[in-house]
Image (tube, helix red, strand yellow):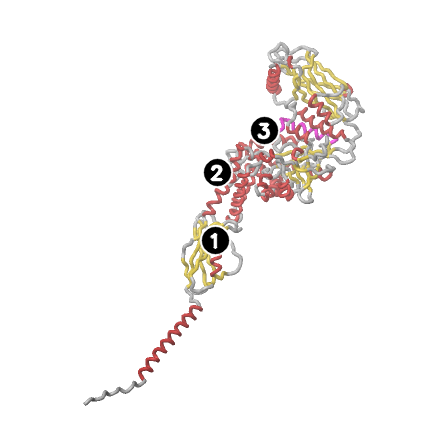
Amino acid sequence: MRRTLTVLAVLLVCTVSSAVWGAERQPALAQPFGSERNEPGGDDAIVGLALESFPAVLEPGDEQISLRVRVWTLAGVAPDDVEVVVSAHRRTRSRFGFQQAMDTGAVGARLGAAVEAVEGLPGAGSRMLRIDRQRADLGLPRGLTAGVYPLQVGVVVDGERVQELTTSIVVTSEEAGPPLRTAFLLPFDAPPTVLPPEGTAALVPDPARTLTAVGPDSRLRALLAAAQAPNTFPVTVASSPRLLEELAAAAATEETSVPAPQTAAQSFLADLGELVERPGIGHLALPYGPADLVAMVRGGLELEAVRHLSIAAEVSQRHLGDAPLDGIVWPPDGLDQATIAQAVTTAGDVVVLGEEQLAIPQERELPASPSPVRSLRTSGAGATTVLVPDPWLSATLTRPPGLGAAVDAQRILAETAALYFERPFAEEVRGLLLAPTQLWAPPEGFAAALLSRLAAAPWLDPVDLERLAATVEPELRPVRLDYPEAARTRELPQSLIAELGRARRALGSLATLLPAGSPIPPRFDQRLLTASSVHYRPAPRRSEATALIRSVETFADPLFDAVTVNDGLQLILPGTQGTIPISISNSSSAPLRVVVRLGASARRNLDLAEGPVEPVVLAPSTTTTLPFEAQVRTPGATFPIDVVVTDVGGTRVLSRGQLVVRSTATSPVALVVTGGAMLFLLAWWLRAASGKRHQRRQPGPAPQREPVHQ
C-alpha cells in the first residue's frame, strides 16, 4: 500500500512541478529512496530532487564542476534540515560494469563528495540549487586515469537519504587513441497522412494528419530542430520518400481553408532540405512506403519490391535537392534470404539490420563491443555488407530511462565512452552505429541534449554510413539472417498482397490505354506504392490500404469495359482484294489508345498487309472505323474473322468480336469446272443431234407383197 501511495505521490509531484516550473525542460527525477518518509498526507515532508544540468565531459584543462539541482517538496511546510550530496565514484572498468552501475546503482568506492545545504525551501514548492566545486573536491584531480566515473546525487532530510539518482562524468586525458567512427541515423518518417480515396485520382493528405506529422508541436519538428541546432552531432538523415511526396502534395494544395497544414508542410520540406545540404550531414532514402518487402516477395511481387527500393533516392532528391547515399538499404523490419536475393541485392550491396535480426553462430558469443560492420552470405558466392546498430544503445535510444533529458542523454554518451575505453588504443579502426526505430519518438528535449553531448565527445568521429562501411574493420565471421515466425505474423496479409498485384496489372494496362502524358497513372502509382507500407500492418488501418488498392480497379474497369467491337455483321468483299472495315466503339468520356488485331481465323482466309500493328486512338463517346487491306485466299468463299482489341502491351483483352466476310469473286477452279461441264454438255448435245439426222437420211427395207390365193 505504501509503495502504491509513493508512486502516486511521485506522479503528483511531476504534475505540480510542471505547473511551477512552466516551460522549463523536463528535469531528471530521482527515484524514491526510503518510501516511509514519502507518504502523502503523513507527518514527514515529501522531498525529491531533479538534476537539470551537469558537466558531461571533464577534459584535462577543466577545473570546476557545476551542477544545477532542483529540490522540491509537496508538504505544506518544508523541513528545516535538507541537504544535497554529490559524490563521485571509482571509474567503471568495462561496459558491463558501467551498465551495472547505471541500472542497479552498483558503484565502486567513493572518491570524493560535496554537500550543499538547501536554504529557503518553500512549502509545496521547489528551489533551484547551483553547486560549484573544484574537480579535486570530488576526487577527480588532474592526471586521473581517463574513463567513465559514476556520479551520484542524493537529497538528505534530517540526516537520512531519501532520494538518489546515478549518472556519470567522462574524464578524458591528453593521450588518446583513434576515435570511434560513429554514424547516427536520424529517421524522418510518419504513418501515411492521406485520406482513403473518394472518386479522385489525386493523393490527398488529411490536414489533421499533416499537422500531427510535421506541425510545430510534432515529434518530427522536434527532431529536425535538434539536428539543426548549432554545435550538434552531424547525423545521417533517413528521409521517407512517401512522406515527402505527401508533404509536397499538402504544400501545393489550393484550398485556403487549411492554411496551417499547408504552411507546416512547406516549412518542414524547406528546413529538411536545408539540413541535408549542410556539410557533414549524410542523407539516406528509406524504401518507399516503407514497404513490407518480405510480404511482397513472398506474394510474387519481387519486381514491385525492387521498385520501392530503386525509386527511393530519386524521389527524395526531387523534394530535398540532395542526392542520397547510393546502394544502402534500411528496411523497416527484418529480411529473409529470398528478399535479400531477389530484391535488396538488386538495389544495393549494404543493408542496415538490427542485431535481433541476425543469427549469431553457436560456436561464438556476441562480444561486448561488436563491430557494426558484418558480412552476410547470400546465394551463390556473393556477400552483402550488413551495418548493425549497437544493440544496447539502440535499446536505450528507444526507451531512455526517463530521468530527464540531461541524465538520459548522458547515459548514451557515457556508454559510448565506456565502449571506447575498453580498447582506447586498438590498432584496427573501430566503429559505432546509433540508430533508433524508424518511428522514433524520444521524450521532450532528449534528442537535442543527446546530439549536443555527442558533438562534444572527442572519442567520437562522426561519419556517414558509406564511410562507416568502407573504413571500419568488419567482424571476421559472416552472419546469417534470423527471420522468425513472429516476424512473419507481422507482415501484411497475403490476401492484400494478391489484391495489390491485380491492381498493379490493371494500372499497367491503364497507363497504356490513356493518352501519353496523362497525370492519372502516376497518381494511382503513388497509391499502390503507399498501400504496401508497413504502417498499414495494424488491422485498424488496413482498410485504408484496401481502399487505395481498390480505387485503381474502380477507376480502370469502366474504361476497360467501354471498348466494344461492333460484330455480328456480314461484309461483302467484291473481287479478291479490298478493304475490310472494322468498327470499334468507345463509350467512355476519354480517348483510349488500343491495338486492334484480326484473329487466327482471319489469317487462314486472308492475306493481310505486312508490318507492325500500330496503336489507334478511339475518340470518346463515338465509333471508330478502321480499314484493313486484305486479299481473299479463296475467292467466292464465305468465312468468319475474329477481331481482338487489347491494350498497347497486349496483356489485357478489352473486347472480342466476329464478323462474316463473303467474297463475290469467282474462283478460277470453279470457272474451269463449270467450263468443262458446259463443254461436256455441249458435246453430248451435238452428238445426240447428229445421230438423229443420220437416222432420217438412211433408206428403209422394201415392203413385201402378200401372195394371192386362188
Type of the residue with mark 2: Glu
Type of the residue with mark 3: Asp
Relative to 643, 415 lies left or right: right
Q: Earlier in the sequence, mark 3 or mark 1?
A: 3
What's drawn in magenta, residue-wise?
441-459
Relative vertical location of residue 463 with respect to residue 590 in this rendering, above or below: above
Whole-number angstrom distance, CA of label 3 to CA of label 2? 30 Å
Q: Residue at label 2?
A: 198
Residue in front for this viewpoint, 517 or 464: 464
Whole-number angstrom distance, CA of label 2 to CA of label 1? 33 Å
Relative to 229, 579 lies left or right: left
Q: Is residue 443 magenta?
A: yes
Q: Residues within 10 Å of mark 3 (few under 14, many from 20)?
A: few
Q: Earlier in the sequence, mark 3 or mark 2?
A: 2
Whole-number angstrom distance, CA of label 3 to CA of label 1? 59 Å
Q: Residue at label 3?
A: 217
Disc 1 element: strand
Relative vertical location of residue 23 with respect to residue 208 in this rendering, above or below: above
Residue in front for this viewpoint, 617 or 697: 697
Q: Residues within 10 Å of mark 1 (few under 14, many from 20)?
A: some
Relative vertical location of residue 676 with respect to residue 43 in this rendering, above or below: below
Disc 3 element: loop
Relative to 655, 361 lies left or right: right
Q: Which mark is in front, 2 or 1?
A: 1
Q: Residue at label 1?
A: 644
Q: Which mark is in front, 3 or 2?
A: 2
Q: Earlier in the sequence, mark 2 or mark 1?
A: 2
Residue in front for this viewpoint, 638 or 421: 638
